[in-house]
Structure formats: structure tokens, C-alpha cells
Image (cartoon, grey):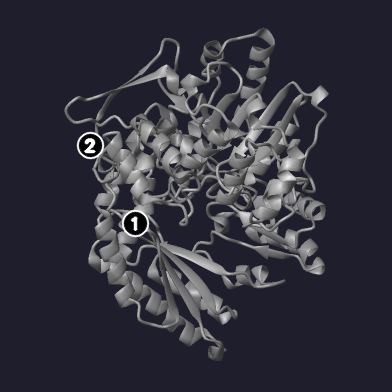
Amino acid sequence: MDFSQRLERILPEVQKPARYVGGEYGQIIKNKADVDVRFALCFPDIYEIGMSNLGLRILYGVLNSMNGVWCERAFEPWRDMAAKMKEEGIPLYALESGDPIKSFDIIGFSVGYELSYIGMLEMLALAGLPLKSVDRKELTPLVFAGGTCMFNPEPLADFIDLAVIGEGEEADAQVVELYRMAKREGWGKARFLAEAAGIEGVYVPSLYKHKYDSQSGVLSEIIPAAGARKTVAKRIVKDLDSSFFPVETLVPSTEIVHDRTVLELFRGCIRGCRFCQAGYVYRPVRSKKPETLVRQGIEALRHSGYEEISLSSLSTSDYGKLAELCDGLLNWCEPRKASLSLPSLRADNFSMELMKRVQKVRKSGLTFAPEAGSQRLRDVINKNVTEEDILNSCATAFEGGWNAVKLYFMLGLPTETDEDVLAIAALANKVYEAWRKASSNRARGVRITVSASCFVPKPMTPFQWCAQNAMDEFRRKQGLLRQALKNRSIVFNWHSPETSFIEAVLALGDRRLGPALEEVQKSSGGLKAWDEYFDFKAWLSAFEKHGIDPGFYALREKGESETLAWDTLSAGVSKAFLRRQYELALAGKVSPDCAHACLGCGADALAGGFCEAAAEGGVR
């Protein structure tokens, strides 16, 4: 029985079989005879999540634009499908061709969430490949990873051959071209990796030795092999206007999480919130011109048939020509009943004018992220948003006819007190009062959703030295806030302390975690980012079996002079700058955003000494 027959037999027995068949409008099929490099672009989560990722769509288009290269997709299957694949002897396959990814030249993972690490290992296991790089002796298949999590790839050091640090459009293409040369000339794996380490933004873990203090267990030294760079700087795309954008993209055959056209306005952020990893690792700010965005947005809508376009960035309302952009898009969208949504709005620059543009076709939800309830704690995290900003923005929305707003907060931020926790409830109640005063239709009621996540310290941020709150402390604070939120119009959502603890362990961990990751994959399978399959006991058991104290990574304050697992890598922002910001946080002092003053973070060096935000006073 061939592959297609076996697949047809099991698909009626699994949920959402459309996840596993490919054939979508816009997929790319190439003649194998014309291809000398086959690339499996893998996303370690289910189809609906992966296909909502703009970065994956960009890389799919970039790689397939290369002559002789065929990039295909693979996603982590849901548990029912994984079980059936094992029963039927079907290895993990690519959606375009149905061929096993084990037979591909290169397997590249896009990893944006630490709990997806197990999904990556599960996909390798389903493919029938050895998990560890050292056990894959030959050049083919080459396994590497990119994405935000690669700013600390050390927990995956045992499993990947290399990591791409930063933005992958250009770096991935260079890795592919070098691989093509290595394959043609018959290089071994060791030679290829040594040569690949010379590509800007490429980190090869096997070329670095980590030494630990025998008493404290703290990382004491990172020793590069002969010829390896002491520091690997991230890769960036300097000109977004001329960079690839997938106007002719895949249109899923089944519903996905973000089922719409997404336009990326700019990369980076001017704000400098001290908890936000993306805000630091994607510096410097680089934006697209509004005419570029209008053209790309219209072309993408025409090609896909979508009826919604979303403007994406870390802080959309900071785009300097947002009104011009919205008008340009709406001139085309409004007659065709296509809507425009603007996530990532700031409470300090939300206006009635902007709101009117957003709701021209239909109202979308409004979300603001104060992050902390008190002004004192917002100053600690450098949020630069006041209570007045938040209340004025909510009142503006209520006056405009909105009757629902979401407010995002974090519990466990550095220096947080119980008074700061209770201030979240007080602010939510003030938002309710703002609705009572501003709404012209109180009969409809209001829904205010307060979501409180657990703070996770992240690498390459000012809070990378911080300890996370213990799980019991998170639970106590959640209970305190829950008791204070008594208004029936306010809905309270909170995040699992156990999940956040494991996320912190992996985010701040080193390569000693490898055996535990392998143990968790073998004992309890993948999909660890999903509540249904998050198995806290499996994690604790794996740590205990391999002599790992997870609290050593998550619950311990790091010393200023301590060598951190990711010190080999650079996002362009200097460690000294991050430390200054950390000390300002402890003193409760704010720093201006990049549009008002350049603080000398160092990221401008990646763009030839030019920082758009500092030079132009904002995002163009």
C-alpha cells in the first residue's frame, strides 16, 4: 500500500484532516528533476498556529524563489494523527510532496516559544531521525533552527547543527547556498559547519565549549574552537521596502488562528519596555514606506480573497504615517467591505481619529497592555504610560460605541508588592467607571477582560538577571487579585504558574538541559505548549532523573559579572546598556523612548551606524 492510500485510510479517524493534506491555493510545487536542494520548513506546533506565522510565509517564499531549491512545509501533528502515523509506519512528511522529511537535504525549524522545543524533538522522532546532532554523522540532513528563541539556543545545543540568530531571509539563503556547494564538492559535516560559522548570524554550538564552576554550578567560561568567532552578532534585513513580502501567499484550506492578510509595518520598537525581549532583540527600528505597504496590502488581498487586513508590528500606533497608510488601504478596502484591524495599540496615542478609521467597515476588538496596575511599577518596567492615558483611551473607545476592552497585565514583575497587584483591580474598576460616564448606550452593558500572565525573565533584556516569582507566590497573587475583582462586568483570566516556570527554565537555561528535554519528549510526547498535553510531573521527573535543579535557572538572581549562557551571541544591544537599564528599574526611574533621545544601546551599528528612530524622531 503506497503513502497516499495509507494516508487516506487514517485521515477519517483524526480531527481536522485538512491539516495534513496540503493542496492549498498558493502552495508551490516544483519538478524534482530541476531541484538540487530540498528544504523542509518545519514549525513545531500544529498547522493552525504555524500557518498564522508571517515569518514562516516569508521564508517559504524566499527559499522557493531560489533556483534549484524546493521548500516544503511540515507541522507537528495533533496527538491522534501522531499515533496513527506510528501505527501505520508513516514518517513525518512534507505537505507539498508527501515525501518523508528524513530524505530532505535541510530541515529548518522556526522556534518562537520555548515550550515548542519538545515539539521540535517530537517532529525529529516522527521523521525517524536521531535527535542528537552528534548521532547524525552525515551532512544530510542538516538540522538547524531560527526564530526568537535562538537568542538563547543553548538548551537545544545537543540537537541542532546550527542556529540562525536574528532575521532569516538572507541568512537562510546563504546557508542553503553553502550547503549546495558542500554537497556538490563532497564536504563532510564538520567542514561544512566550520565554514557555515563564518556566515554572519550563524552560530554553531559544537564549536563552543562551556565550562562550569564545580562548586556553584554557574557557567564560568565559554571557549570558542580555533577559528570560531568569540561573539556571533544577529542578522538583520536593513531595507524592508526592498525585502521579500509574500503578496502571493498560501491560502489555507481550513480555518487558522489568524486567517487574514497581515502587513508588517516595521521591525524593532522605540519604547524600551524592560521586560520585552522582542523590543530589544529586533532593534534597530526599520520601517516600510506607506506606499509600499498600501501596494503590498492590496495585492495580497486581491490574491488571497481575504476580507480583513491586519497591521502588524510591536507597537502599531507608533508608525508615523499611520493615518496616511490607513486611508490608502481603506480607499480600496471600504468599497469591497474589507476591514482593517490594528493590534498592538498604545494607550498613550490612541485617538478618536484613529478609532474612526478602524471602524469604517466593522469594529474589531480593542486591547491595551498597561502591564502593571500602579504608576510606580509601570515606571520600573519603563512602560511610559500613565493611568490618565489608559482611562482616556478607554473613554474614547466607549464614546465611539465600543463596549468591550481587553487589558493585559503581568504578575511577578521585579519589585512588585501586594499594593501593585491590587492596583490592577483598582485600574479595572476605573475603566468600568469610565464606561459608565462615556457610553451612550449602557443598556448593552460592558465587558472588561483583565488578563494577567506570569512574568518570565528573558535573555537580552534588562531583566535577564532577575529571578522569577515562585509558583506558590504567583498563586497567592492571583488569589489576591481574583478576590479584589468583584465587578461582574470584569472578567479575570490568569496564566498557569507551572507553565510559566518551565518557560523560564528553558528561556534562561543552558546546554545541560538537553538530557531533560530528550527525556520529556520520550516519556510524554509533544504539544507541550497546549494545556491538554502540558505535563508538569514529566518535567519535574526529567529534571530529577538528570540531576537538574530547575530553580537554579528560573528562581535565582544572576550576578552582574556572571557569564550567561547566551553571552556568545549579540542582538546588537550591549550588555552594559542592559545592566544600566536594570539598575534604573530597581531605582524606579524611567528612560525616554528612542524618538525623544538616543540612549546609545548599540543596535545602530548593525545598520551601519544609522538608527531610524533616533534620526527621524520616531517611525517614519
Tally of marks: 2
Assign a secondary structure to mark 2: loop
Quarter of the figure that contains the N terminus = top right
**Can the viewer see residue 454 in this picture?**
yes
Query: In the rendered view, would you say 539 is above or below 302?
Result: above
Q: Nearer the viewer, residue 470 or 364?
A: 470
Q: Amino acid at mark 1?
A: Pro
Amino acid type at circle 2 is Gly
The answer to whether 502 appears left or right of 61 in the picture is: left
Return the residue found at the far left. Answer: 215
Which callout, 2 or 1, points to the residue nearer the camera?
1
Residue receiving disc 1: 497
Percent across and percent down for residue 242 are 70, 37
Q: Where residue 174 appears, x then y in whole percent?
A: 63, 23
Q: Quadrant of residue 255?
A: bottom right
Residue 167 can be seen, yes or no: no
326 vs 53, nearest the viewer: 53
Q: Residue at x 39, y 32 (%)?
A: 514
Q: Between marks 2 and 1, how big is the CA–CA gap? A: 25 Å
Left or right: residue 620 versus residue 564 is right
Quarter of the image where one finds residue 114 = top left
Question: 105 or 526: which is nearer to us?
Answer: 526
Residue in view at x 74 percent, y 54 percent:
253
| Mark 2 nearby-residue class (10 Å; few <14, some 14–19, many ≥20) | few
Residue 322: x %, y % from top left: 63, 58
What secondary structure is marked by label 1? helix
Query: Dots 2 and 1: beta carbons under 8 Å?
Result: no
- Give left or right: position of 42 versus 330: left
| In the image, farthest residue toward the bottom | 443
Residue 466 lies, with reference to residue 35, above or below; the image says below
Q: Residue at x 30, y 33 (%)?
A: 546
Tell me the residue that label 2 is attached to. 559
